[in-house]
Amino acid sequence: MNDVQKDHKVPTYNRRDILLGTVAAIAMVGFIIYGVLAMYDRTENQGFHGIVSQKDFLPAAETQITVGTGGVTARDLKGQYRLTVHVESRETDYFVWVDEPAFQRYEVGDRYFFIRPPDDTANTAVPASQDDSQVVVEPAAE
């Protein structure tokens, strides 16, 4: 039939190729591990650990409607579930609104972690008396 022979070459790798591949694989795995550890550290520092000091259920039946990529979904809520969490490091209480399963899972005295509220920054908190937005400037009398 066809007298053309196909030239099959078996690839050969020398030490340099194997060494470069190994170094590249180790670098990629190291980069992935570094990324995971860096994300964990950043998330851990963005929240507070506190103790649940009070549980409140505020009855207010409502239907929540959500529009998203999955279409329109609706769910009926009996009311709002709120935990009061005391953060010892900040010497303050925070109200944290949660879903019913989380409300049932935590009891008064349990430790609770939550993400820092957007208006509560760690290093730029200024007492209201020193805040520039609270200062009233009156026009000078002529």
Image (cartoon, rainbow, N blue to C red):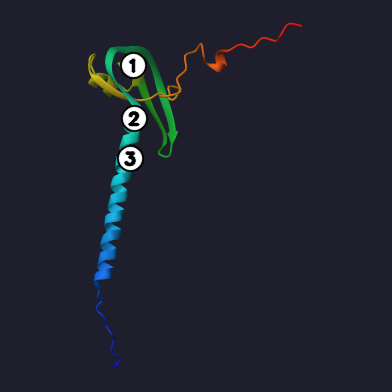
> Looking at the picture, how far across and down is residue 86, in whole percent?
31, 15
- Could you tell me which residue is drawn at 45 percent across and 20 percent down? 125
Residue that label 3 marks: 38
Dividing the picture into quadrants, the one containing residue 25 is: bottom left
> Looking at the picture, how far across and down is residue 138, in whole percent?
66, 9
- Could you tell me which residue is drawn at 35 percent across and 17 percent down? 90
Mark 3 or 1: in front is: 3
Q: Which element type, helix, strand or loop, lies under badge 3?
A: helix
Residue that label 2 marks: 45
Give the mark nearest the N terminus, 3 or 1: 3
Residue that label 1 marks: 82
- Could you tell me which residue is drawn at 39 percent across and 28 percent down? 74
Left or right of 130 on screen, residue 14 = left
Could you give the CA–CA distance between mark 1 and mark 2, rounded to whole angstroms?
A: 23 Å
Question: Please, is residue 73 above or below residue 35 in the view?
Answer: above
Could you give the CA–CA distance between mark 2 and mark 3, rounded to whole angstroms?
A: 11 Å
